[in-house]
Every structure is written in structure tokens, then in C-alpha cells.
């Protein structure tokens, strides 16, 4: 079995995340509000507007364009994480 590594088109700076979203995603809006309240910086990328990003999200989510998909400074990703999960991954 071969493991495939998919690299995000955008890697965030330390202490922040890249959030792949859509304009209609309620989970994305909720997480953005929580990140704002917690003072965690993020770069939002709408997969319906930025070429190549929907394919990245699909690649890390088993063929699904599931948002929010977050990328952390170490290049790892998480799909629809809780605020607690984001904080824990940023403090490692």
C-alpha cells in the first residue's frame, strides 16, 4: 500500500491556520466566529472561487469537498475541527 501526501496550496504562518470554505457553509461561519473570539488568525480561501483549491480539499477528504478544511503550520489538515482541536494543534 502506498501513502500519498497532498500538499496544501497554502501553508499558514506559525500560530494561524488556512481555512478552506464556501460562502454558504454554516460550519465555516461558526468556526470563523470562534477563531475570531479566540484571537486565532486565519486565511480564508473559498474553494468555489480559487482555482485548484477544491481539488486539494477533495484529495484530503476522501474525494469529498468537505469544508471547513483547515491546514496547520506543520502542513497537516483537519476537517470541521472544534475550536479546542484547533487550539491543541496550534500549541503542539
Image (tube, rainbow, N blue to C red):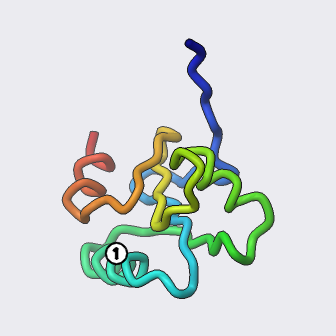
Q: Height in image: 11 above or below 49?
A: above
**Front in this rendered view, residue 41 or 4:** 4
Q: Quadrant of the C terminus?
A: top left
Q: Which residue is mark 1?
A: 31
**Front in this rendered view, residue 48 or 34:** 48
- Where residue 89 sits in the image (x, y, percent)? 30, 46
Q: Height in image: 6 above or below 3?
A: below
At 65% from the left and 53% from the top, the residue drawn is: 10
Q: Height in image: 10 above or below 35?
A: above
At 66% from the left and 70% from the top, the residue drawn is: 47
Tell whether 45 sits left or right of 13: right
Q: Quadrant of the N terminus?
A: top right
Tell whether 70 sits left or right of 44: left
Tell whether 21 sits left or right of 47: left
At 66% from the left and 51% from the top, the residue drawn is: 56
Q: Secondary structure at mark 1?
A: helix
**Front in this rendered view, residue 12 or 57:** 57
Q: Report the number of discs.
A: 1
Is the residue marked by circle 1 packed among few (<14), some (14-19), or many (20+) residues within 10 Å?
some
As drawn, which residue projects farthest toward the left?
84
At 47% from the left and 41% from the top, the residue drawn is: 76
- Where residue 14 sits in the image (x, y, percent)? 45, 50
As drawn, which residue projects farthest toward the top?
1
- Where residue 9 sits in the image (x, y, percent)? 69, 51
Q: Height in image: 53 above or below 25?
A: above
- Where residue 86 sits in the image (x, y, percent)? 30, 56
Amino acid at each position: 500500500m502506498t501513502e500519498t501526501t497532498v500538499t496544501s496550496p497554502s501553508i499558514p504562518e506559525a500560530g494561524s491556520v488556512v481555512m478552506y470554505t464556501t460562502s454558504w457553509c454554516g460550519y465555516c461561519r461558526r468556526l470563523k466566529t470562534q477563531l475570531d473570539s479566540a484571537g486565532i488568525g486565519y486565511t480564508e480561501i473559498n474553494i468555489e472561487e480559487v482555482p485548484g483549491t477544491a481539488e486539494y480539499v477533495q484529495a484530503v477528504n476522501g474525494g469529498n469537498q468537505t469544508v471547513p478544511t483547515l491546514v496547520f503550520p506543520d502542513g497537516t489538515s483537519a476537517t470541521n475541527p472544534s475550536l479546542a482541536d484547533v487550539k491543541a494543534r496550534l500549541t503542539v
